[in-house]
Image (spheres, rainbow, N blue to C red):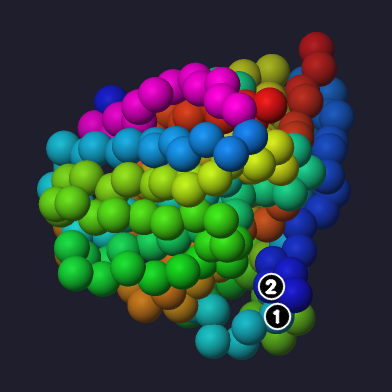
């Protein structure tokens, strides 16, 4: 969905490096999410934010941090990347009032940690 | 603890056949059960969803069947087409209050 954009789309980095993945949305939704997808493991929630002042840990938050800079922006950081963080990362948005809390996903960022 | 269990992991169906994917959940407080469809290189997108006040919901060739007592729900794809080949995820949540918990996904291949 072009309304949810993720940058970069692909990234190769080295162990120990700090990396930030960015998500922007023009849907006006108040809720934003970060997931990682691994083959055979499905979509696992890293962090979520129900509004600008709300940040919550998901199922697998260790090794990650987030920042909700504005309603439209939600960034995911890996403070010191490790190889098992190699995965496909998705940002998603939803809004209970206008979209019945349906989640709209971005196109994903493929991250490789060497 | 896996809150939503999805099966099978992969499925091959002949064109025109019926594809069936099953999910089971543990948290009896869940009251929203969507299915998401993901094509290669794309993010998942909502396909169909059900609330527990009904036992079945149909949208075109796609039907969700819901069994509250068994804590199970399933996706049926009638007259499966090659264009339906994708990965399907079931999910569950307490609607509006908690984020979705996803199953591990089913890779469906529809062959001619």
Circle 1 SS class: loop
The front one of A75 and B107 is A75
Q: Is residue B91 visible?
A: no
Name the quadrant of the N terminus of chain B.
bottom right
* Residue, disc 1: B26
Q: Which is the main secondary structure of the residues drawn in magenta? A: strand
Q: CA distance from mark 1 to mark 2?
A: 6 Å
Q: Residues within 10 Å of mark 2 (few under 14, many from 20)?
A: some
Query: Against B18, is B58 above or below?
Result: below
Residue B3: assigned label? 2
Question: What residue is drawn where x is 19% and y is 69%?
Answer: A53
The front one of A31 and B107 is A31
- A48 relative position to B38: left or right: left
Residue B50, position in %: x, y? 49, 64
Residue A102, position in %: x, y? 36, 54
The region drawn magenta spans A3-14
Does label 2 lie on the same chain as label 1? yes
Residue A40, position in %: x, y? 78, 44
Question: What residue is drawn where x is 54% and y is 45%?
Answer: A80
Query: Which chain letter goes with mark 2?
Result: B
Is A11 in the magenta? yes
The front one of B65 and B27 is B27
Residue B80: assigned label? none
Res B70 → quadrant: bottom right
């Amino acid at each position: 969905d072009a309304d949810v954009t993720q940058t970069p789309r692909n990234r190769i980095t080295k162990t120990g490096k700090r990396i930030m993945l960015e998500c922007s949305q023009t849907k006006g939704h108040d809720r934003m999410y970060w997931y990682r997808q691994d083959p055979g493991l499905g979509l696992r929630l890293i962090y979520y934010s129900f509004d600008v002042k709300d940040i919550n840990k998901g199922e697998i938050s260790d090794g990650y941090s987030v920042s909700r800079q504005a309603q439209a922006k939600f960034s995911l950081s890996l403070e010191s990347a490790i190889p098992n963080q190699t995965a496909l990362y998705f940002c998603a948005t939803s809004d209970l009032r206008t979209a019945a809390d349906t989640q709209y996903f971005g196109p994903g960022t493929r991250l490789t940690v060497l | 603890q896996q809150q939503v269990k999805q099966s099978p992991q992969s499925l091959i169906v002949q064109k025109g056949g019926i594809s069936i994917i099953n999910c089971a959940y543990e948290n009896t407080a869940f009251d929203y059960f969507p299915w998401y469809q993901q094509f290669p290189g794309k993010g998942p997108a909502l396909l169909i969803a059900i609330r527990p006040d009904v036992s079945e919901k149909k949208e075109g060739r796609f039907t969700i069947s819901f069994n509250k007592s068994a804590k199970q729900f399933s996706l049926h794809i009638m007259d499966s087409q090659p264009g339906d080949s994708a990965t399907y995820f079931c999910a569950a949540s307490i609607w509006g209050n908690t984020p979705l918990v996803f199953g591990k996904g089913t890779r469906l291949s529809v062959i001619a």
